[in-house]
Image (cartoon, rainbow, N blue to C red):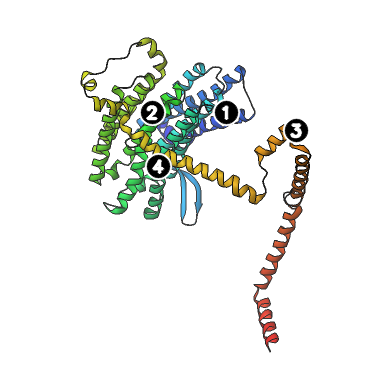
Amino acid sequence: MIGIAEALVHSASLIWLVPALPLAAALLIGGRMLQGVSGDDAEPVTAALARGAALGSGLLLLVFLLAALLAGAPGHLLLGNWFAVPGFSVPVSFLLDQTALLVAAVVAFIAWVTISFSTAYLHREPRFHRFHFGMSLFLGGMLLIVLAGNAVLGFVGWELCGLASWLLIAYADERPRATGNALFAFLCNRVGDAGFLLAIGLGFWWLGSVEWPVLLGGTLAETVKLRMLLLGLLVAALAKSAQLPFTPWITRALEGPTPSSAVFYGAVMVHAGVYLLIRINPLLQQVPDMAVAVAVAGLATALYGWLCGRVSSDVKTSLVLATVVQVGLMVFACGMGWTEMATGHLLLHAVWRAYQFLLAPSYLVLAPKPLPLSRWLAGNGQLYTAALQRFWIEPLIAALLQRPTLLLGQDVRKLDERVLERLVGAPDLQQAAAATEGGGSAGVGGRLLGWLATHFQRLESRLVFQNERGGLVGVLQRLGEMIRMLEHLLEQPRYLMLMVMATFVVIL
């Protein structure tokens, strides 16, 4: 038994395979999409890749959990350097304690069940392959968040989850509502990402490392630096777990298919912020006022979700608002320092809510009549209206984030069309297409101008945009190399002295 335990401990160096398997599946599915695979015959291979990667990661995690039970968890594990520059390096490291291994195993299990369910649920859907690509990308990112040994690697997983979420919210990208909701959720989560990046930068600046054991070591004590570092991490956690004031994005995110709603918002990704709070709790408890603020935010979010859920009229929105309530209670527990309670609550809620979301299409048959509205809420008109409008937080977030972003994008597009394209001489594609479709309707003058434009474009391509060393670009490159060689010669001491002596001769 001791030999088996030692062998299992030594196998911990293969932990990188756990997130690598779903990421490799996403890469293979993406390659198949680029090759243009489609039809019923292509679906089994795509589903097998996504499902097999999730199952493989889950089985590996069970092995590592068995090793942790028999011989103890490996803890912080360094596998090598990811990248390094003078004065800064980021290793490939994993933090393998029992909490991380248990949460990761539950994540992989839920993803495997959801992907298996999706194979039949999305059969013959035109975006079948893109859905499984997004699910595999999400699973790899979520496993990185849970298992990462440093903040940078965790942030990579954080961004992969955000990208996969955006892809699947905009699953029906021909509908403006879907793309608008994807943009809204994307922008809300970018605020949290900015906080995470701030914490990474401050951690390296003040502590010289981004490894979680160093960041959580408590060497900053209760100072302004600790508060700044905590602030970035707390913003990231609250945004990802849809806590106030970031809550409205989670109801917008239900635009995607039901299986992705089960994994992203009901069961897994919405708990990523809670998991981060559990990780940084040793730092959080050093600053009591910030811990109290987290607890208050969790309670306020739970109350908000409960009131809004009482007036919700559809199944998925009711479930996601119930999720907001439970996650708010987990955040409250983290603020109070009850991390073991929060961890147990997270694991149980993730499994139960995933089951409920996958069962959501059947609720129309199981519960054909909605529950009656509570008398006390129906009798309070102002509170009922506020809950129905979700306390008007969503329009405020849209005005502060979504609308300025759309206006900025429109301004950049106008700048590109009216200034930059004219400066570089790029043709107006819409006018060119209209002229081409119109045929002879442009008249003799129009056809003459089109002929001249075509030949001038060919001349420009020959002179400027020819091959790498040809044309005008090649001539300018060779001239620049000659000038650089001459400059290098003149910088030599002997030539510099010669130039000084020649200057004196001319002066005299």
- Of mark 1 and mark 2, the one earlier in the sequence is 1
Residue drawn at the location 63% of the way across and 47% of the way down: 421
Q: Position of residue 164 (x, y in %)?
A: 48, 32
* Residue on which the image places disc 4: 191
Query: Which circle, 3 or 2, is nearer the viewer?
Result: 3
Of all residues, the one furthest to the bottom in this rendering is 508
Q: Secondary structure at mark 2?
A: helix
Q: Residues within 10 Å of mark 4 (few under 14, many from 20)?
A: some
Whole-angstrom CA distance, mark 1 to mark 2, is 29 Å
Q: Residue flagged by tag 3: what amino acid is it?
A: Gly
The image quadrant that residue 487 belongs to is bottom right
Whole-angstrom CA distance, mark 4 to mark 1, is 30 Å
Quadrant of the rendering where the N terminus is positioned: top left
- Of mark 3 and mark 2, the one earlier in the sequence is 2
Q: Residue flagged by tag 1: what amino acid is it?
A: Ile
The image quadrant that residue 349 belongs to is top left
Q: Secondary structure at mark 1?
A: helix
**Residue 439 tag number:** 3
**Residue 29 tag number:** 1
Q: Position of residue 444 (x, y in %)?
A: 79, 39
* Residue on which the image places disc 2: 251
Q: Residues within 10 Å of mark 3 (few under 14, many from 20)?
A: few
Q: Position of residue 383 (x, y in %)?
A: 25, 27
Q: Nearer the viewer, residue 127 or 69?
A: 127
Query: Which circle, 1 or 2, is nearer the viewer?
Result: 2
